[in-house]
Image (cartoon, rainbow, N blue to C red):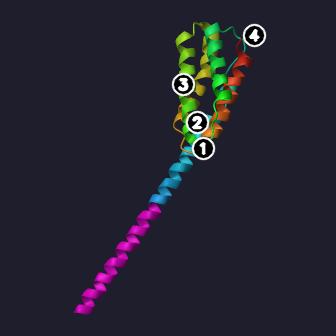
Amino acid sequence: MKYVIFTFSLLALVSCKDSKNQETKMEKAEQSAETHNDHQEASKVYANAWASEIQLNDGNKWQANAETNEGILKMQNSIETQTTSTLDAFHKLAEQLNDDKNYVIKNCTMKGASHDNLHVWLLPLMEKIEALSEAKTVEDASNLKRSIEENVNAYHTYFE
């Protein structure tokens, strides 16, 4: 009888251990899937699809108000001057860019088609800044910063 109890106990122990291994494997698979989904979502944000939607003013740049132009220069300065080698530094850059973006929104007096096209340019930038503030790896943050910089620098292609 002792051998039977010992055998059942041993089987239960092995069974529990296998169950824990399965749980660990499942957790790792779920984390991998989440990381993959995060990368897919981030790659959508990296893209500059807005460039195919924005229009020029009959071949000319749109006239922007001085405060909007000033806010864009603030963004460019933030990108150029802040060192970003750690995730924390990227998150701080995102905070600064968010402040700069809020300055643009608060002080924009543009109307009509110029304002509509500013939104075509600005809305994806806002998504990128938000994604940068939530980035989980330096690699993703670096890619987002690069995409933000492209977005911000393209402003002068469409606005003056």
Mark 1 or mark 3: which comes first in sequence? 3
Give SS at disc 4: loop
Q: Which mark is residue 138?
A: 1
| Label 2 – label 3 distance at C-alpha | 12 Å
Task: Looking at the image, tell me whether mark 2 or mark 3 is earlier in sequence order.
Answer: 2
> What is the three-letter code of the residue carrying label 3?
Asn
Q: On the image, numbered disc 4 is attached to which residue?
A: 58
Q: Which residue is mark 2?
A: 90
Q: What is the number of the mark on residue 98?
A: 3
CA gap, disc 3 and disc 4? 31 Å
Instruction: Tell me the residue at 64%/39% (across/down).
Output: 142
Image quadrant in which you'd find residue 53 = top right
Residue type at mark 4 is: Asp
Looking at the image, is mark 1 or mark 2 earlier in the sequence? 2
- Compared to 114, does 35 lie above or below? below
Q: Residue furthest right?
A: 59
Front disc: 3 or 4: 3
Residue 96 is a magenta residue: no
Q: Residues within 10 Å of mark 1 (few under 14, many from 20)?
A: some
Please state which of the two labelled residues, at mark 2 or mark 3, is closer to the viewer. Answer: 2
Q: Give the percent coordinates (x, y) of residue 54.
A: 68, 20
Residue span colored magenta? 1-26
